[in-house]
Image (cartoon, rainbow, N blue to C red):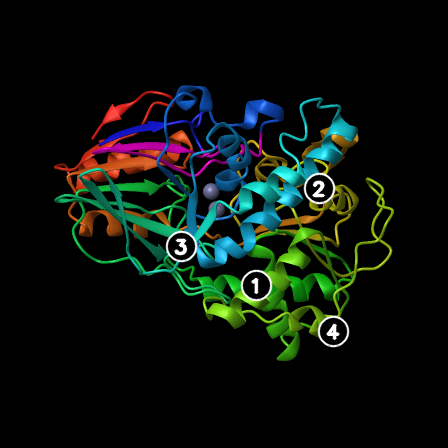
Amino acid sequence: MKLTDLNTYGGIGANSLLVEIGKFTLLIDAGLNPKATGLDGVPNFSLIRDRHIDFAILTHCHLDHLGAFPIFLREHPETDVLMSQPSHSLAERMLHNSVNVMKRQREEQYIPEYPLFTHTEVEQISTRFLPLIFGQSKKIRIEDDELELTFFPSGHIPGAAGIEITHKHRSIFFTGDVLFDKQMILPGAKFPRRDYDTIVMETTHGATPKLKERSREGEVERLILTINKVIQREGSILIPVFALGRMQEVLTILQKALKTGAIPKCPVFGAGLGMDIANYFDQIARKTGLVKFNRNVIKDLKLQNLPRKLQPGRDVSTAGIYVLGSGMMIERTPSYNMAASLLAHHHNAICFVGYCDPDTPGGKLLETKTGQTFLFESLDYQTPVRAEIEKFDLSGHAIREDLLEFAIQANPRAVVLTHGDQPARDWFIDSFLMEAPNIQVTDPTPLQTFQI
Ligand SMILES: [Zn+2]
Ligand SMILES: [Zn+2]
């Protein structure tokens, strides 16, 4: 098997992996790098422009996996994309939203190449998205060669899949983005426990040490306690969330806490794509039973829209809980603007609940101590950090020990590391060396083809 990581800058970003096995050439994911602008955020498709790609796979609908598919499919009219049923319900909606965001960025940030694709293109390519039911194998033939493909739920977000590919005597497993723990709205990953020849795995939390005393339930409790404390001192709480997955999880946590009286009645605000995704989750829950989510959450919380005018440094007029995208507080998003309003005031709190890339404003704020200055670059505003900054481990990604354990129990000949910063990958390289030195571990150099 040959693999080529098309994610030009490595790390987590424009995730896309070319796989060549037997007579098959396939692409797993085609994402946009959320930290890059314009064409710089697209995987390096020039390497495969003249190649015939037999089929593509989408592991899940986060844009760092899905966002560049319209560009890839424009260059490859021969290729269809296989994805899980829930992803099939969500992909088109996510891409249309991406067009809207890019159009806005074109105006606000003068990025002439935006949008990278249009609503019409999204509509057209969506007919080439093919759903595959979890656990049902699909055989694909080319001449005398055959390959078998099976999707397994990977936790993470609704629809997210780990992919098993069997070719001749050889089985390979791609974890995709994975969470083994169960979430409020989603069961944990259900991966086969068996031997694999090769495991291709994500490494997001490789540099995050396990905090023994912390469990997911414990973290939910700690979040609720923090919210209580801030409400009592009449401050506001900002919870930055990814629109797809984390937002619906947090809203469900709040709904439960309000119902049981664990937090007092208070205004809850939500905005953006996540609200619409809630409707999709509701439908997926009713159609497939793969998600535990009900859109009544929004009614129960009496969820309100964001106040129109926000000014950096000026506290919000209505104290409450603000559940806003983006999760990493990317510039010019509701969570970024809200943080600029709240950060200078002692009684407020910003509660991060998911993964924050260290290069994003969210990642940088987590590194800033109370009293130090934080700069909101695109707002041209800086302030000492006075609000309480907290981090809760409710990430959609597995802790590193769980991933290591999964990989080692599969008794593989080889492991390939993807979807992680260098320190995260380094931890896995060292850990495999210590715990399973027979496994050949590869940390791919972007754009270089290697044989496994
Ligand atoms: Zn993801
Ligand atoms: Zn990802």
Quadrant containing the N terminus is: top left
Task: Decide: is 257 above or below 26.
Answer: below
Picture coordinates of residue 427, whole percent (x, y): 32, 36
Numbered badge on residue 333 = 2
Q: Which residues are magenta?
A: 12-35
Asked if the residue under mark 1 is in contact with the one under mark 4, i.e. CB atoms within 8 Å, the reply is no
The foreground one among 402 and 76 is 76
- Is residue 77 inside the magenta stretch? no
- Is residue 15 inside the magenta stretch? yes
As measured in the structure, the alpha-carbon distance from the residue carrying label 2 to the one carrying label 3 is 26 Å
Q: Secondary structure at mark 2?
A: loop
Residue matched to label 4: 265
Residue 339 falls in which quadrant of the image?
A: top right
**Residue at the outermost bottom position:** 260
Numbered badge on residue 281 = 1
Numbered badge on residue 429 = none
Numbered badge on residue 179 = 3
Disc 4 beta carbon < 8 A from ligand 1?
A: no
Q: Amino acid at mark 4?
A: Lys
Q: Secondary structure at mark 3?
A: loop
Q: Secondary structure at mark 4?
A: loop
